[in-house]
Image (cartoon, rainbow, N blue to C red):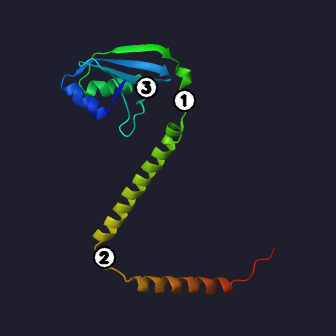
Amino acid sequence: MQTLTLEQLRATAMAGGVSSVTLKAEGGGFFVSIHTRAGADAILTKARSCEPRQFARPDKAMALLREMGIEVGLFDVSHWNPEAKAMTSGNEGRARAMRETHAAARHTKWLVGEVQAAIDDPRPSIAHDDVMAEMEAELLALEAAASKRPAKAK
């Protein structure tokens, strides 16, 4: 059986080379099987490997096919077992990785905004050494005030 990536399927569909598509269930996942006008059967695979592209939900696969102009197809749920959705190393940490990516993007957006606000601030700039000297003086004053206070009784 041949394999087609998403881009290859898109090109084949646009050229009129797809005669039919079947959405096949295996365990808890769904796969796209393609029958081409050349008579060859193929399966939709991931872009960076020959591993079949699996969809956890059939509506996601159907939306993808419809986006490519493939609006009529078949389905085969004879081997569907919704309880068999396997947690693999590929999808086990995916949600966590996506949350971390989104958090990093939010932080970057916030940081860019803070830097731009500082750049746009019309007040005159203060030299780093002046700020550090002022902070040192404030810390020394706080330490001196703390040492003059009477000790608390326990």
> Horizontal and vertical percent for residue 7?
27, 34
Amino acid residing under circle 2? Arg
Label 3 sits on a secondary structure element that is loop
Amino acid residing under circle 3? Arg
Q: Which image quarter is the N terminus in?
A: top left
Q: Residue at x 35, y 38 (%)?
A: 47
Q: Earlier in the sequence, mark 2 or mark 3?
A: 3
Closer to us: 125 or 85 = 85
Q: Residue at x 54, y 35 (%)?
A: 88
Q: Quadrant of residue 52?
A: top left
Identify the mark at residue 86; answer none if there is no mark: 1
State the residue position of label 2.
123
Q: Which image quarter is the C terminus in?
A: bottom right
Mark 2 or 1, which is nearer the eye?
1
Q: Are marks 1 and 3 in contact (CB under 8 Å)?
A: no
Closer to us: 144 or 12 = 12
Q: From the viewer's perspective, is residue 28 above or below residue 49?
A: above
Gap between marks 2 and 1, in whole Å?
A: 58 Å
> Horizontal and vertical percent for residue 43?
36, 25
Gap between marks 2 and 3, in whole Å?
A: 55 Å
Label 1 sits on a secondary structure element that is loop
Q: Is residue 6 left or right of residue 53?
A: left
> Horizontal and vertical percent for residue 21?
31, 18
Q: Quadrant of residue 22?
A: top left
Residue lying farthest left? 15
Gap between marks 1 and 3, in whole Å?
A: 13 Å
Q: Is residue 84 left or right of residue 71?
A: right
